[in-house]
C-alpha cells in the first residue's frame, strides 16, 4: 500500500521508517521544491504531485501550513486524512480557537486582532504581560510577541501591522492576543482516532520549552486526574472533527486545571518518546489509522524521556552506552537551533530515569541541552 505525506521533514521520515515493517510504502511531497521524494533516502521520485496522489492509497500531512490549492487537490481524491478542515484549523489559530469554543474545551482568554483598536482593547481586557501570535504562520515560538509594558505597544504594533498588511484577499492575515498564563507546567497529549471512531491516547507528556522550542519531554509522571482532563479534551476535539490519525494537544497546567495552548493535526515532537516507551509509536499508529488498519497499543511500557538535539551535528558516542538510550538522527543540514535529532531514554521507574538522565549530562553540556540536569535531579 502506498502512502503520500505532504511535507518531507523528519516527521515524514519517521512515519516512513515506522511503516516499513507494515509493508506500507511512504513517499513525501516537498512543498518547497515541489518534488516527490523518498523521505528516508531523499531520492527524488519521478512523479508529479498529481501522479503521486493517483498512485497513493492514503494521503496525510506532517505540517499544517500547506497551500490551499494543494489541500483541495488532496481533498478531491477522497483519500486525505485527517483532511483539509483539520489541517486548516491546525494552521490558523483563529479557526483553532473557534473549534475549542465549539467543543467546549477551555483555553487561555483571547481576542482576535485585525486593527490597532482591537490591540489596545485586548491589552485593557487581558492585561499585561500579554502574548500576541500570528494566526496563519508560526511554529517553534516564531511569529509571537510579548507585550510587557506600555513602552512595547508602538514597536510591537508596527511589526503586527506589517504582518496584517502582508495578507491577501484569498488568505487574509489575522493576529490573536492571549492572556499570559502563569502555568505550573506544560503538558501534551498525543492520541489517535481510527476510521471507525475508536480513540486511543498515549500517556500524558510533560514538556519543557526553551525560547519557544521544545527541549525535553517526559512521559510517566502524570497524575490520573490531570490525565483524564487531557483525554476528555482529546476525545471531544477528535470526535468534533471526525478525525482520522494522530492529533496532538498542548496544554498549560494551572493548579491542576488544563487550558489548551494549541493543537497539531499530526504526529508531534512531544510524542517522539513513544518510539521507545510504547509497543506502537505515534508514527506507526498514524500510518495504521490513515491506512485503515487496526490501531496498536498506546499503553506506556516504561517512563521515557526525549531530549531534542538542536543545531548540533553529533553527540559523544558514549551516550549510546547508557542503558536503554537510543539516538534518532534526521539527516538534515545543520543550522543554529534546528531540530537535528533526538535522544530517547527509558527506565524501570522515575528514579532510575533520573539516574540515566544524570549520566547523560556527563556527555551533553547544559547550554545546548537545557533542563536535562535539573530534570535528572528532580526525578532522583
Ligand atoms: P510549536 O512549535 O509548539 O507549534 P508555536 O510557535 O505554535 O510552537 P506556541 O506553542 O503557541 O508556539 O507557544 C510557544 C511557547 O510559548 C509555549 O509552549 C509556551 O511556553 C509559551 N506560550 C505561548 N502562549 C502562551 C500563553 N498564552 N501564556 C503563557 N505562555 C505561553
Ligand atoms: Mg504551534
Ligand atoms: Mg506549541
Image (spheres, grey):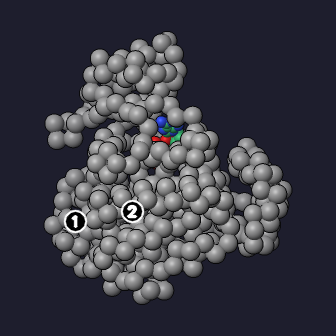
Foreground pick, 354 / 369: 354
Which residue is situated farthest in the front direction here? 225
Q: Which class describes the residues within 10 Å of circle 1: few (<14), some (14-19), or many (20+)?
A: many
> In the rendering, at what x and y percent does residue 162 appear?
32, 25
> In the rendering, at what x and y percent does residue 159 appear?
39, 24
Quarter occupied by residue 108: top left
Label 1 sits on a secondary structure element that is helix
Q: Is residue 207 above or below residue 302?
A: above
Quarter occupied by residue 55: bottom left
Foreground pick, 186 / 285: 186
Q: Looking at the rendering, in which quadrant would you find the C terminus?
A: bottom right
> In the rendering, at what x and y percent does residue 260 appear?
45, 47
Residue at 40% across, 79% down? 288
Residue at 36% across, 58% down? 236
Q: Which mark is residue 74?
A: 1
Q: Which mark is residue 12?
A: none
The residue wearing badge 2 is 235
Q: Which class describes the residues within 10 Å of circle 2: few (<14), some (14-19), or many (20+)?
A: many
Left or right: 77 as drawn, with respect to 349: left
> In the rendering, at what x and y percent does residue 220 appear?
65, 64
Label 2 sits on a secondary structure element that is helix
Residue at 41% across, 45% down? 106
Residue at 27% across, 35% down? 173
| Cα separation between marks 1 and 2 | 26 Å
If you read the primary sequence from the N terminus, does the residue marked by circle 1 or circle 2 appear first? 1
Q: Is residue 133 above or below residue 239?
A: above
Amino acid at each position: 500500500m502506498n502512502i503520500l505525506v505532504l511535507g518531507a521533514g523528519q516527521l515524514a521520515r519517521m512515519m516512513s521508517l515506522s511503516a516499513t515493517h507494515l509493508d506500507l510504502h511512504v513517499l513525501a511531497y516537498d512543498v518547497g521544491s515541489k518534488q516527490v521524494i523518498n523521505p528516508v533516502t531523499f531520492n527524488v521520485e519521478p512523479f508529479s504531485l498529481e501522479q503521486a496522489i493517483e498512485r497513493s492509497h492514503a494521503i496525510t500531512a506532517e505540517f499544517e501550513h500547506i497551500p490551499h490549492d494543494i489541500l483541495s487537490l488532496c481533498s478531491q481524491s477522497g483519500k486525505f486524512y485527517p483532511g483539509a478542515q483539520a489541517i486548516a484549523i491546525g494552521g490558523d489559530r483563529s479557526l483553532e480557537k473557534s473549534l475549542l469554543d465549539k467543543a467546549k474545551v477551555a483555553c487561555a482568554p483571547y481576542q482576535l486582532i485585525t486593527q490597532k483598536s482591537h490591540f489596545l482593547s485586548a491589552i485593557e481586557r487581558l492585561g499585561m504581560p500579554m502574548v500576541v501570535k500570528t494566526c496563519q504562520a508560526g511554529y517553534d515560538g516564531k511569529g509571537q510577541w510579548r507585550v510587557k509594558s506600555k513602552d512595547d505597544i508602538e514597536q510591537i504594533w508596527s511589526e503586527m501591522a506589517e504582518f496584517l498588511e502582508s495578507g491577501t484577499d484569498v488568505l487574509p492575515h489575522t493576529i490573536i492576543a492571549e492572556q499570559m498564563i502563569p502555568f505550573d507546567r506544560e503538558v501534551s497529549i498525543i492520541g489517535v482516532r481510527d476510521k471507525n471512531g475508536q480513540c486511543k491516547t498515549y500517556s500524558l507528556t510533560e514538556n519543557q520549552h526553551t525560547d519557544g522550542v521544545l527541549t525535553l519531554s517526559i512521559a510517566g509522571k502524570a497524575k490520573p486526574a490531570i490525565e483524564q482532563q487531557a483525554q476528555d479534551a482529546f476525545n471531544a476535539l477528535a470526535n468534533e472533527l471526525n478525525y482520522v490519525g494522530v492529533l496532538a494537544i498542548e496544554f498549560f497546567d494551572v493548579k491542576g486545571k488544563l487550558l489548551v495552548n494549541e493543537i497539531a493535526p499530526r504526529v508531534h515532537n512531544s510524542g517522539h518518546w513513544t518510539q521507545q516507551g510504547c509497543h506502537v509509536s505515534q508514527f506507526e499508529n498514524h500510518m495504521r489509522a490513515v491506512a485503515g488498519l487496526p490501531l496498536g497499543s498506546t499503553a506506556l511500557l516504561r517512563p521515557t524521556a526525549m531530549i531534542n538535539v538542536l543545531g548540533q551535528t553529533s553527540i559523544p558516542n558514549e551516550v549510546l552506552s547508557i542503558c536503554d538510550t537510543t539516538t534518532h538522527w534526521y539527516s538534515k543540514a545543520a543550522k543554529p537551533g534546528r531540530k537535528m535529532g533526538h535522544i530517547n531514554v527509558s527506565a524501570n521507574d522515575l528514579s532510575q530515569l533520573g539516574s540515566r538522565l544524570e549520566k547523560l549530562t556527563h556527555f551533553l553540556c547544559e547550554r545546548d541541552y537545557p533542563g536535562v540536569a535539573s530534570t535528572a535531579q528532580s526525578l532522583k
